[in-house]
Image: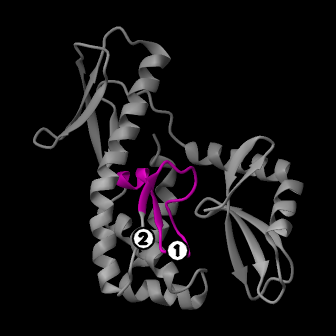
Amino acid sequence: MPTISLNGQPVEYLVRQSGRAKYLSLRIDSQRGLQVVTPKRVRVTQADIDALLKSRADWILKHLTRMDNATAGITRDYADGSSMPYLGDDIPLQHIPAAGERISVRLDSKKGVFIVRVPDALRGQSRTDAIREAFGKWYSKQAREHIPPIVEHWAQQMNLTIGAIRIKDQRTRWGSASSKNNLNFNRRLMMAPPTVIEYVVIHELCHFFEMNHSPRYWAHVATHCPDYKRLRKWLKTNSAALQL
């Protein structure tokens, strides 16, 4: 996904073409983030896109910040007995003192708890930040193990050849696909139910047939995921809870 520096901040954006658009414009939503909408019948250069983004830098950053605040939804303290979502379930945390300075997170599937090893010396915000970082790494690891086999399965079903599969820490997007057949997925998808993860995989793979969200694109999605409207709604409704 292309990135531009706006007022010193790197900002990712998506370029999508529209047959109904008459001029170059911008859109921002919680599912796709910042989008540059280009008219289908008008030649648009990268210089045109850069100029538009830079001219609207204040507006873009203001709305992205507002969206971040709206989707934050939950303030986590990661205290003993609190919970974190994993594959659609809320899993309680059990703190255990760590012998050294290293913090670790593991899922005890038999007990149904997250075992969080954390030094007693860590207190306050430093403790919270350290546990958040440990959980971020844990979700990334789970995503790297869980998501590629789903991608491979559905790529075979659709007769597609896939490039790189990357797991990222993205603010607003659950996944993205490039014209080079590379895929990016948000590590926080591991907080969602398996059916939702599968929907997002199918959603991104279908972009290799249509790099847009036209009726033809959604027809591809419906072919492989008939229940996509319900799953899409679930993700939109619950996105505020799928946060670190």
Disc 1 marks which amino acid?
A: Lys
Asked if one can make out residue 154 in the rendered structure from this viewpoint, the answer is: yes
65 or 51, which lies in front? 51
Asked if one can make out residue 88 in the rendered structure from this viewpoint, the answer is: no
| Residue 165 sits above or below residue 208 on the image | above
Q: Is disc 2 in contact with disc 1, using a CB cutoff of under 8 Å?
A: yes
**Numbered mark located on residue 38 in the image:** none
Residue 44 screen position, x and y as percent: 82, 77
Residue 172 found in image quarter = bottom right
Q: Is residue 36 magenta?
A: no
Residue 103 found in image quarter = top left
What residue is drawn where x is 32% and y is 64%? 148
Q: Which residue is mark 1?
A: 180
Q: Residues within 10 Å of mark 2 (few under 14, many from 20)?
A: few
Residue 223 screen position, x and y as percent: 40, 89
Q: Which residue is mark 2?
A: 163
Q: Is residue 182 magenta?
A: yes
What residue is drawn where x is 58% and y is 63%? 31
Mark before the other along the chain sequence, 2 or 1: 2
Residue 222 found in image quarter = bottom left
What residue is drawn where x is 74% and y is 66%? 27
Q: Residues within 10 Å of mark 1 (few under 14, many from 20)?
A: few
| Residue 158 sits above or below residue 75 on the image | below
Which residues are drawn in magenta? Answer: 165-191
